[in-house]
Amino acid sequence: MISETVVDLSRLQFAATAFYHFLFVPLTLGLSFLLAIMETVYVMTGKEIYRDMVKFWGKLFGINFALGVTTGITMEFQFGTNWAYYSHYVGDIFGAPLAIEGLMAFFLESTFIGLFFFGWDKLSRRQHLLVTYLTAIGSNLSAVWILIANGWMQNPVGSEFSYVTMRMEMTSFRDLVFNPAAQAKFVHTVSAGYVTGAIFVLGISSWYLLKGRHIEFAKRSFRIAAAFGFASALSVIVLGDESGYAVTEHQQTKLAAMEGMWKTEEAPASFTLFAIPDDARRANSAEIKIPYALGLIATRSTDKVVPGIDRLEARAAERIRQGMEAVQLLELMRAGKAGEDQKVRFEQVKDDLGYGLLLKKYTKDVSQATPDMIAQAARDSIPPVAPLFWTFRLMVLLGFSFAALLALSFWYSAKNTFQEKRWLLRWAVCFIPLPWIASAMGWFVAEFGRQPWTIYGVLPTQLSTSALSAGSLYGSLAGFLFFYTGLLAVEMYLMFKYARLGPASLGTGRYEGEASFQPAH
Amino acid sequence: MLDYETLKLIWWLLIGVLLLGFAVMDGHDMGVGVLLPFVGKNDMERRIIINTVGPHWDGNQVWFITAGGAIFAAWPLAYAAAFSGFYWAMLAVLWALFFRPVGFDYRSKVNNPTWRSAWDWGLFIGGAVPPLIFGVAFGNLLQGVPFHFEDNLMPVYTGSFWGLLNPFALLAGGVSLAMLTFHGANYLMIRTEGEIQERARKAALIFGSVMLLAFALAGVWVSLGIKGYVITSVVDPGALPNPLDKTVAIEAGAWLGNFARQPLLWAVPGAAFVGGLAALLFAWTRKPVLAFIGSAVAELGIIGTAGVALFPFIMPSSSDPRSSLTVWDSAASQMGLSVMFWAALIFTPIVIAYTSWAYKMMAGKITAAYIEANDRSAY
């Protein structure tokens, strides 16, 4: 049996490498479309300043993109290296979107990004514009496929367990692709990326304006970012709400934990604006509630009940007991000792197989599970409340503050007075790092909130790892931290260096401060 | 929907195509990385060398990423067993690959000789380590890997990292490294001129010869000194995959079995020699495009030889032969294979078309004048 240390370290390594990877993804998603918009303006107006904008913001895009590629490969390797049982158990479904992502999205994005950087003199204006769009579309398509894969982890549709192959097998590719959980996630994630790109451009442009540098360049960049960002911020909120609705449908445990709903309330449930959840005591203190709000948001109705943790645990205990039977029947079948009746019975109870597997944490022989173990496993089926409660609220708060910043920026850029509003410019500069924090919070809620499962209701995290030693994991984790810290330091150094220089780094002779910069000779 | 047996065979071929795509495309970039510190004597020369692959390395690397994704999707058990079993080897590949995107993109963004030289060696590591380890992995596949499946099909590797680095596996690693370096040298000849081109030509002659000699030696070693694997129970190729549902024996000479049964298959190792020798000849007579095609054919022959020798095995187990993974019992479901088959059929030609367009638009020699004119934007 795999030790808890190995499971914990595998999770830690995955969390660390995934968070790190996602430092670079949102900016790629958002900035790529901003570049395409800027270049469209260039092609339409023929004004050189817009080409300079594409080239300069493109330089920052490139610095970010390099680490996105670097850390992305880790993600693909890691399922096999550290989550071997997961890879076997669900590879038939989970692997397909990953492979298609490579074929359809990565090739597109990676082939054309080369032409984006090096093709300025070799391509016609329209050809180059097309290349920029294809790069942006490629990055966004890759988000489609990876979120289809992740959506399936949250809501495993279109698949069925087979006892011969001892794994989940695909039964409908269409259901996998049109999984409502994946759709909602995709739009929410890419719009969060657009907000990140917009605040990045907005913040750096504001800094130039505060310093009185590259005024024309900064003003034009600011305007484009404000318009694009405002539209995106609205869609993050609207579609994040849609994502919340999808969670209610498919992952009631996540919702109950996020909301700190220890007890089931009568419909429509109230929304807890503030509280201090206590996982040990299984209750909240200092609650501030808005009546009816959660019921309306989560069920789009006034009469459907949002089940609380008490009810969900009771339901889980029932499924665990049924799952015990499924596990035992499966073992008989694998040993070739099952009769026809037992095979028929297995088909009836196999939807609860995953719940039976939750007991493997406590006993190797599931048939020997005690009522205590069942109660314990039922408790495990609810993720820890406090961390989810807080990260979710922080994410939402950040989301609304971005919307406010972008709305005001858009308003003042429409009135063309933003350059005088120094408070607004300062606000934009301070906000540069925050979209990354919001994204990280969002992923935390999605992934930590799915615990104790890697595939919700199907495969417990406990059983998903590789058969590795704790020593190997300590070693690899140390290696990742070493490389990633070093690479991040280098990336930040270059990002600051080029952001400070601004368009002077292009060497066109049109921007102030060029004499101080000699990169090559 | 195609029948299951056919789909399993098609996916064996398609994984081969993706590995070949990796060797031909990403392979020449990696070869260029290996040669970079030696063929480029100063900063300008090195910038010329790096910019021959500058616009393309990223797209080319996707062959590698897609091959990884396809193995995951088409052979989930093999992906799980190999990636977790070869844990430290895979991490070494991964960490070496870290140096490539940042090496290419960051190197010329700071004008400091130490900085630049450090990234040059980073690109060398990123070019040399992956092909070496992939070769070592194939060398171990041919000898069998110590792993087994538990009852619930959890793969467990019982060897050590150092056990992978045995003499035959290192020889196979040498074949692979020489092969990609040879290919990279041929590419470099196409895109450069003058002294760099001359040095690349010398490198091509050396690495091409090493590749052919090492490949021949490995062939002799396999036929005389390495035992192969055969399935001894009746196989139903269309059955639902279950690797524990068969018996396997270890026999001397078994890796030559497919060639003995189908003598036409000797054409595959034949292609390695014909392609390799032709490429050497064209490098010698300064016809770099033909030399590049020749080394691509040699790659087809060498990768194909390993695949054909192993067939139907993908990952034989030395410690528990019945746990060995074969084309028949590592595959994804019929629907999974079918969906991806159509995806590959539609998208691969599209990818090849736009990649060709990208090369066409960026064609021509990279010169010092080009670097100077694009000082701020070139790598």
Image (spheres, coloured by chain):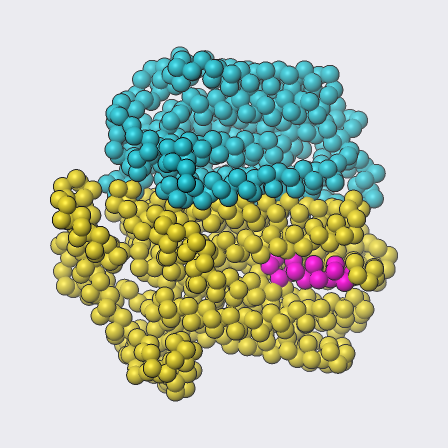
Where does the image place residue A115, in percent across and percent down from the top left?
71, 46
Q: Determine whether B300 is above or below B371 in the image.
A: above
State the image quarter where residue A353 is shown: bottom left
Q: Determine whether B147 is above or below B260 in the image.
A: below
State the image quarter where residue B150 is shown: top left
- Residue visible at 40% across and 25% down in the picture: B311
Where does the image place residue A495, in percent across and percent down from the top left?
66, 58
- Residue visible at 77% across and 34% down in the picture: B364
Going by the image, does B377 lie left or right of A81? right
Where does the image place residue B358, in percent across and percent down from the top left?
69, 41
Residue range highlighted in magenta: A28-42
Front-most of residues B99 and B217: B217
Chain A shade: yellow
- Residue visible at 70% across and 56% down in the picture: A58
Whether residue B156 is visible, yes or no, is: no
Prevailing SS of the magenta stretch: helix
State the image quarter where residue A201 is shown: bottom right
Disc tally is 0
Let me know if residue A41 is in the magenta part.
yes
- Residue visible at 39% across and 87% down in the picture: A291
Let me know if residue B335 is in the magenta part.
no
Chain B shade: cyan
Whether residue A138 is visible, yes or no, is: yes
Front-most of residues B332 and B368: B332
Pick out the residue farthest to the front. B1
